[in-house]
Image: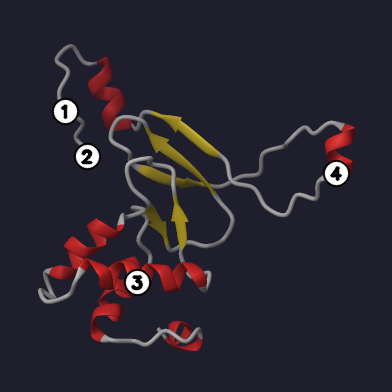
Amino acid sequence: MEKYRDIGLKLTPQRLAILHYLEGNKDHPSAESIYRAVHKKFPTMSLATVYSTLSVLKEKGSVLELTLDPGKKRYDPKTTLHNHLICVSCKRIVDIHGEYKLDLTENEKQEYTIIKSHVEFYGLCPECNKIKTSPAKEASPCA
């Protein structure tokens, strides 16, 4: 938690709870899901506290704001370059690693200097794929 103090984040008990929730979290949670999880321990905490904490973390480069789901922003505490795979049914997001070659024309190569990339893949997660291929279609188990 020292790294958050070093970036100038005031470490209140509510913010510490948010940071602990995010630490190592691979679910790419929304602000609302972070709020629901942390609100259990801090019932007087507001959703605004979660949003303001995420805003500071984003500004300081300690969390990535993902706009992969048009319905809501999601947050990723893993800030190293990586890509994402998104289930089109349940909206589950997983990290994927690897580099993907981008073929640019000679003109594009001369005009642009690429400094980073992010690739999004869309498909069905294993659970939603099972439902899609099963005779009795049910609601997504991942949602």
Task: Tell me the CA gap for discs 2 and 4.
Answer: 43 Å
Type of amino acid under label 1? Ala
Query: Which of these two is toward me, 143 or 43?
Result: 43
- The residue at 18%/11% (across/down) is 135
Q: Residue 6 carries which label?
A: none
**Residue at numbered disc 4:** 111
Q: Mark 4, mark 1: which one is toward the viewer?
A: 4
Alpha-carbon neighbours of circle 1 within 10 Å: few (<14), some, or many (≥20)?
A: few
Quadrant where the N terminus sits is bottom left
User: Outermost residue, top direction?
Assistant: 135
Mark 1 or mark 3, which has the lower sequence index? 3
Mark 4 or mark 1, which has the lower sequence index? 4
Q: Residue 143 carries which label?
A: 2
- The residue at 52%/38% (across/down) is 120
| Element at label 2 | loop
Q: Position of residue 72 (x, y in %)?
A: 33, 47
Question: In this rendering, is residue 110 above or below 103?
Answer: below
Disc 4 vs disc 3: Cβ atoms closer than 8 Å?
no
Query: Which of these two is toward me, 87 or 130?
Result: 87
Type of amino acid under label 3? Ser
**Residue at numbered disc 1:** 139
| Element at label 1 | loop
Task: Tell me the CA gap for discs 1 and 3.
Answer: 34 Å
Task: Tell me the CA gap for discs 4 and 3.
Answer: 38 Å
Disc 2 vs disc 4: Cβ atoms closer than 8 Å?
no
Disc 2 vs disc 3: Cβ atoms closer than 8 Å?
no
Q: Is residue 19 left or right of residue 135?
A: right
| Element at label 4 | helix
